[in-house]
């Protein structure tokens, strides 16, 4: 929507897509089906570009784009026999997708600020463990739970947004609650 006019973004050939974020330049990111599987996309100046997937993966989705044009999202696959999911966050910039080195077989990128700092969620103990919020800055992934004072009673599960001041929003649970 701009100046009272709705612009249809289109799709990547699969008939369906969802936009998740827009930056100040009007670049839009999201996920669109290419057939059977969704792929991350970048839409700008009326053109939707398929960002692809990381090597070995089958689907992807873009969650956020910063004002520099860096995109964060997730790329992965689901095991057809066990239905276990294997996802990893990515950063897309300069025409290439690269994985964020999160130590988890199931993790997702949620947001990226203009400094390129990424936040998201990971299953630190494997695919059936609880989610843990993470931050990726200066080449280092940190479980945000390691940064909160002991005894707070909180478990930081999802980091969903980060601004340019480095403030993070997300979801926290009572650490004593069962998931």
Image (cartoon, helix red, strand yellow):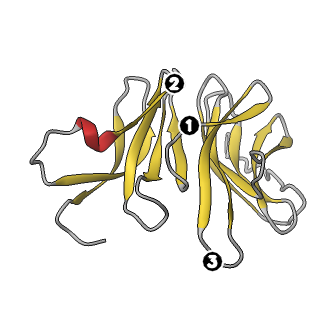
Check disc 1 and report the residue beneath it: 101
Measured as percent of width and height from the top left, residue 70 is found at 65, 29
Look at the image and tell me in which quarter the C terminus lies: bottom left
- Cα distance in 3D space between marks 3 and 2: 33 Å
Measured as percent of width and height from the top left, residue 74 is found at 63, 49
Residue 30 visible within the image: yes
Measured as percent of width and height from the top left, residue 48 is found at 84, 44
- Secondary structure beneath dot 1 equals loop
Q: Where residue 139 is drawn, which disc sits there? A: 2
Q: Residue at x 9, y 48 (%)?
A: 151
Q: Residues within 10 Å of mark 1 (few under 14, many from 20)?
A: some
Q: Quadrant of residue 174?
A: bottom left
Measured as percent of width and height from the top left, residue 170 is found at 36, 48
Q: Where residue 152 is drawn, which disc sits there? A: none
- Secondary structure beneath dot 3 equals loop
Check disc 3 and report the residue beneath it: 82
Q: Nearer the viewer, residue 99 or 64?
A: 99
Extreme-bottom residue of the structure: 81
Q: Quadrant of residue 10?
A: bottom right
């Amino acid at each position: 929507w701009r100046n009272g006019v709705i612009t249809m973004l289109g799709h990547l050939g699969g008939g369906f897509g969802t936009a998740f974020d827009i930056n100040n330049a009007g670049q839009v990111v999201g996920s669109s089906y290419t057939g059977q599987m969704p792929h991350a996309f970048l839409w700008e100046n009326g053109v939707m570009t398929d960002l692809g997937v990381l090597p070995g993966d089958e689907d992807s989705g873009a969650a956020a784009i910063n004002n520099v044009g860096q995109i964060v999202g997730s790329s992965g696959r689901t095991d057809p026999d066990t239905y276990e999911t294997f996802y990893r966050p990515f950063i897309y910039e300069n025409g290439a997708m690269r994985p964020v080195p999160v130590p988890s077989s199931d993790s997702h990128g949620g947001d990226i600020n203009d400094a390129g700092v990424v936040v998201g969620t990971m299953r630190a103990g494997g695919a059936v463990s609880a989610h843990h919020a993470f931050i990726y800055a200066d080449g280092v992934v940190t479980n945000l739970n390691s940064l909160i004072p002991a005894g707070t009673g909180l478990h930081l599960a999802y980091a969903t947004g980060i601004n340019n001041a480095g403030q993070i929003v997300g979801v926290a649970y009572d650490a004593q609650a069962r998931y």
